[in-house]
Image (cartoon, helix red, strand yellow):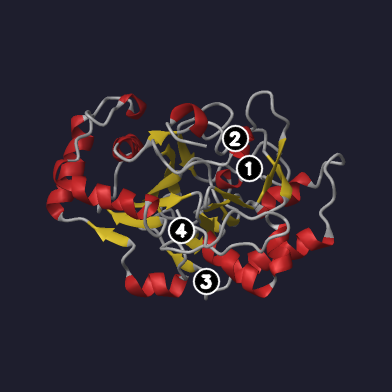
Amino acid sequence: MNAITTAEHSDDLPLSRATGPTCWKGADLAKSGEWIIEITEAEAQTLCDAVSRTDGRDALDLSADDFPLAAAAAKIAEFRHQAVDGRGVALLRTGLAGLTEEEARRLIWGIGQHMGIPQKQDGRGTLLHDVRDTGADYTKQHDIRVYQTKSEQPFHNDGADLFCLYCRRQASFGGRSMIVSAHTVFNEILDRRPDLARVLTEPFYFDARGQQLPGRPWYQTLPIYLQHQGNWFVMHKRHYIDLAQRNDEIPRLTAAQTEALDLMDAICHDPAFNMTFEMQPGDLVLGSNHTLLHARTAFDDPKEGQDLSRERRHMLRLWLGVDGGVALPPAYRETREFGYLFETTNRAT
C-alpha cells in the first residue's frame, strides 16, 4: 500500500497525494514488462503434476498441502508479492492452456491457497466464480452483475484484498482487459481539480445488485477514495452508482458528483494512464482491490450458424484475503466487497 505524504486529512486540510510503487502509468508498465512473470517448463510441469494429482477431487476441498508448488513456489511468491507489496498487479504466464473446466478450477484454487484466503463473492457465499456470458442483461435484471454478461465492464474494483483471474478461453471478438492505477488517477484529479478530489472522498450510493450483507439495505454508501492510517483505498463502480439512481429513495447525484465521476472516468480511459492487454489461455492476473481499477471491453462469442472453431469466452475468478494485511477502514465492515475480510483474516482496523 501507499503511504500518504501528510497526516490523515480533515475537511479543512489539503488532501494528501499517494506515493510509492502503486503510482504508475500504463505506458511505463507496458514498456518495462516487469509486471509479467514467465515460468519455465519445469515450473509449469510442477503445476501440471499438482492438477493431475488431484484428479477426481472437488477444487474447493483442496488445501495448500494438497497442491504443492515445488519448483514453482518462488514464482508464485513473486506473483503475490507484486500484487500485495509492489505495484498492485501482476500477470503469471503459466503456459497451461487447454485445461478442462475442472482442471482449471483446481489450478486457480490450488495456487490461490498459497496466496490468500478465499472470500465470498456474492450473497450465496460462492468462493469461485465462472466469468462468462449468461445471456442476461444487467440493465433490466437488478440482481445481475456485469461479469455475467458480454457487455463492456467499466473501470471498477472487486472485493476482498485481491482478485485472481484465470483465462481458460478468450472471446472470439473483443473482451480485452484494461488496468489503471487508482492512486495515479487520484493524484491526477488532485492536480487538476482539488475540489473534485474532495468530492470523491465523500459518500456515494452504490447499487449492491442484490448481493448485500445479511440485514443490510440493497444499496451501500461509501466514498470512492477513503484514507485510513496513512493509506488510500478505493471503491469505484460508476455503473452501480448510476444504477442506484433508479430508486426514488436514493438522493440524486449532485452536479459536482457527476463532474467528479466524469473526470475520474476520463482519466481512467486515457491511454496515457491505463494499459490495455489481452489475456491468453493459461494466464493468471492478480490485482489489489485497494489500489487498482480494471475494466473489460465488450465481447461476443460464436452463435449458431457462425464459425464455432473458437469456443465461448471463459474465465475463473477468486477473491482472496491477506492474513495480516493492511489495516482496513472501519466503514468497510458494512460492504459486501470487504465485510468478510473482518471475519476471515487477522488484521488491525
Q: Which residue is mark 4?
A: 172
Q: Which residue is mark 2?
A: 336
Amino acid bearing label 3: Phe
Nearer-N-terminus badge (1/4): 1
Kindly state the secondary structure of the residue where label 3 is placed: loop
Taking depth in this image into account, of 53 and 111 the one nearest to the observer is: 111
Give the residue furthest to the right.
Answer: 248
Q: CA distance from mark 3 to mark 1?
A: 32 Å
Nearer-N-terminus badge (2/4): 4
Q: From the top left corner, tell me how far across and down residue 249 is, in percent.
A: 86, 39
Q: CA distance from mark 2 to mark 1?
A: 22 Å
Q: Which residue is mark 3?
A: 273
Q: Mark yes or no: residue 245 visible.
A: yes
Q: From the top left corner, tell me how far across and down residue 120 is, in percent.
A: 50, 31
Nearer-N-terminus badge (2/1): 1
Disc marking residue 136: 1
Question: Crowding near pointer 3: few (<14 within 10 Å), some, many (20+)?
Answer: many
Q: Is residue 285 above or below residue 16?
A: above
Q: CA distance from mark 3 to mark 2?
A: 29 Å
Amino acid bearing label 2: Arg
Kindly state the secondary structure of the residue where label 2 is placed: loop
In this rendering, the label closer to the viewer, 1 or 4: 1
Question: Crowding near pointer 1: few (<14 within 10 Å), some, many (20+)?
Answer: some
Amino acid bearing label 4: Ser
Kindly state the secondary structure of the residue where label 1 is placed: loop
